[in-house]
Image (cartoon, helix red, strand yellow):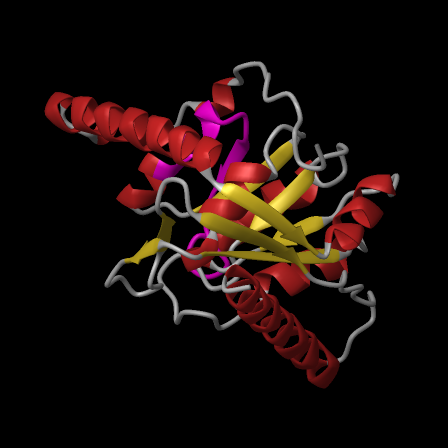
Amino acid sequence: SLLRHSTKRSFRWRDFDLAFLEYTVKQRIWLFLCAGLAWLALLVIGATLRLKVVGGSFYRQMLRRSGDFIYALWHGRMFLPLCFIRGRKITVLVSRHRDGELLKWVLTGLGYETVRGSTTSGGGKALRELLLESGRGTILAVTPDGPKGPARKVQPGVIFLAQRKGIPILPVSGAAQRRKLFASWDNFMLPLPFSKAVLAFGPPIFVKPDLNQVEFQQQCINLERSLNEITELAERACQE
C-alpha cells in the first residue's frame, strides 16, 4: 500500500543515550516496561484502524524527489503519522525530557532514528545533528510546537533547518473518529482500536535560502496555517 514499507534497521550506538545511565535501576526497568507497552499498543491499535489517506499525492511527490525533506507534525497529533510513515530512513527530533526518553525507545522499536533536543532548549546541538543527517539521504521529522508548547504554535527551528539545507517541509496530521483526548498541554490524541482514521498531508512548503526576518516569520505562519488546515480536514473526513 501507499504507506507500507519494511521497518528493518541496524542498531547504532547513538541510539544509546548516556543520560539513560543517570536513572536508577527501578526507573530504567519502569522505562523499558512503559516503552514496550507503548510500542505494542501502537502496533496493535495501528493494525486495527480503518485508515484513509488525504493528500497522498503530496506524499508521493516528496518520495519521488532525489533529495531530503522534513515531515512537520503537531505534537498532539503524532500518533497516526509516526504509526504509518515509518519504514524509510527517517530521523525524528525527540525532546530531552523524561517523556522524550520513553518516546525515543518506542520510536527506535518502530525503526526510526532519533536526535535528542528541541526547537527551543537544547535545540542548537540537535539542529546541528539534523543538518548533518539531512545530507545523508535521511528524511527528517519534527514537531514544531514541541516539546512543551505552546500547542499548535510553530517554533522557528524547523524553518531554519529547511532554509539552511534547502529542503522542503511536508505538513502531515491525523484524526480518528473514536479517540481519547488527553488533558495534556498538547491535547494528545490516541485513536481507539477499530476506529476510522484519516492521515492528511498538505502541500509541500519550499523555503528560500535568503529570507529576511519578515519573510522568515511569514513562513512560520504559513506552516502553522497549513498544519491547522489539514488537521481540520482530517477531522471532517473522519465524520464522512
- The quadrant holding residue 161 is bottom right
Q: Is residue 145 left or right of residue 88?
A: left
- Residue 32's image quarter? top left
Q: Position of residue 69 (x, y in %)?
A: 74, 48
Q: How many marks?
A: 0
Left or right of 145 on screen, residue 10: right
Q: Position of residue 5 (x, y in %)?
A: 67, 26
Any part of residue 21 in sight: no
Which of the pair 202/159 is nearer the observer? 202
Q: Nearer the viewer, residue 219 or 180?
A: 180
Question: The C terminus appears in which quarter of the rendering?
Answer: bottom right
Q: Is residue 42 magenta?
A: no
| Quadrant of the drawing holding the N terminus | top right
Tell me residue 19's x, y (percent).
31, 32
Question: Residue shown at 65%/79% (left/top)?
Answer: 217
Is residue 153 at least partly visible in the picture? yes
**Residue ranking furthest to the left:** 26
Viewer-proximal residue among 148 and 4? 4
Q: Nearer the viewer, residue 123 or 137?
A: 137
Left or right of 99 in this view: 229: right
Q: Is residue 5 above or below residue 139?
A: above
Where's residue 166, x and y in %? 81, 55
Above/below status of 236 relative to 39: below
Q: Tell me where the magenta segment starts and ends, as one range.
A: 103-122
Which quadrant of the figure has residue 194?
A: top left
Residue at the farthest bottom position: 214
Above or below, 99 relative to 200: above
Residue at left offset 72%, top offset 41%: 134
Report the residue at 71% width, 35% height from top: 138
Task: Give the side of residue 152 with respect to residue 41, left or right.
Answer: right
Question: What residue lies at 82% left-to-right and 65% top-to-bottom?
Answer: 209
Q: Residue furthest front?
A: 240
